[in-house]
Image: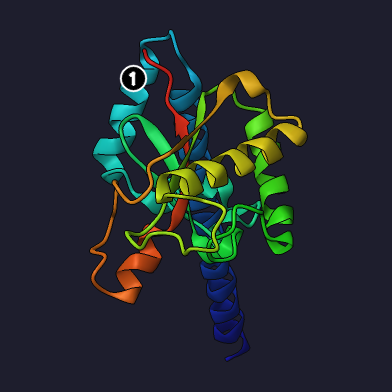
Amino acid sequence: MKFFEREDNLENELNRGALWAITYGDMMSYLMIFFLILFAFYSSKNISSQFAMKSIEETFGKDNEVVSTIFSKHGIQQIARVEISSNKITINFSEPILFDPGSDRLKASSLPHLKKLAKVFKDIPNPIQIEGHTDNIPPGRRSPFKSNWELSAARAFSVLKYLVENEVAPEKLSAVGYGEFKPISANDTPEGRGTNRRIEINIIRHEI
């Protein structure tokens, strides 16, 4: 009887070992995918980078969750949405995260997150474009901004200035304000307008 108990215990131990090996294998697979993404994104001359990106896209269908691991360790996923397309990675911040309504001054609570993001940007060679967007409601009479264009541009520049102050190379940064003219939701509801009030930071993929 004890023999069978020992045999069962041994089988359980082997099963636990197998589960550990599977988990470890999955982790290594994701690490490999992560470095392939970095290679495909950063390489500007090697044609094999195009093949690597194509292989990843065919396997995962541009799975945002996989790409998002680039930023998750810095806490960016907690306050922003990270997306990937064929030519850029976009980090989308809604208005309340970075700015008070109608203001172009960065909120103190947002600075630690932007500082961590600056550390990421310091180490990559890619161009980084900062876009400011608003809803379609004009600034109030007391606002220092005469149009949403001015407000969105001022907000984008505030982010750019902070990144430069945290040692991101200014030559790879640019800022632009689109006002209400590039909405991602309808402006006929409070929720839609809230979605449209945003800052998008785009990491531009190098041309092959």
Residue at coordinates 31% horizontally, 21% vertically from top-left? Answer: 51
Residue at coordinates 54% horizontally, 59% vertically from top-left? Answer: 143
**Residue 13 visible in the picture:** yes
Q: Secondary structure at mark 1?
A: helix
Residue at coordinates 66% horizontally, 54% vertically from top-left? Answer: 106
Q: Say what amino acid the circle numbered 1 marks.
A: Gln
Q: Look at the image and name its color scheme.
A: rainbow
Name the image quarter holding the C terminus.
top left
Coordinates of residue 190 in the picture (x, y in percent):
34, 75
Q: Count the marks: how many?
A: 1
Coordinates of residue 8 in the picture (x, y in percent):
54, 80
Residue situated furthest top in the rendering: 45
Residue situated furthest front in the rendering: 141
- Give the side of residue 30 with respect to residue 179, left or right: right
Q: Is residue 131 above or below residue 142?
A: above
Name the image quarter holding the N terminus.
bottom right
Instruction: Count neighbours of disc 1 (C-alpha within 10 A) and say few if under 14, some if 14 to 19, many if 20 or more.
Output: some
Q: Is residue 82 above or below residue 59?
A: below
Image quadrant of residue 79? bottom right
- Give the side of residue 84 with respect to residue 96, left or right: left
Camera-side residue of 137 and 188: 137
Coordinates of residue 194 in the picture (x, y in percent):
40, 67
Report the residue marked by disc 1: 50
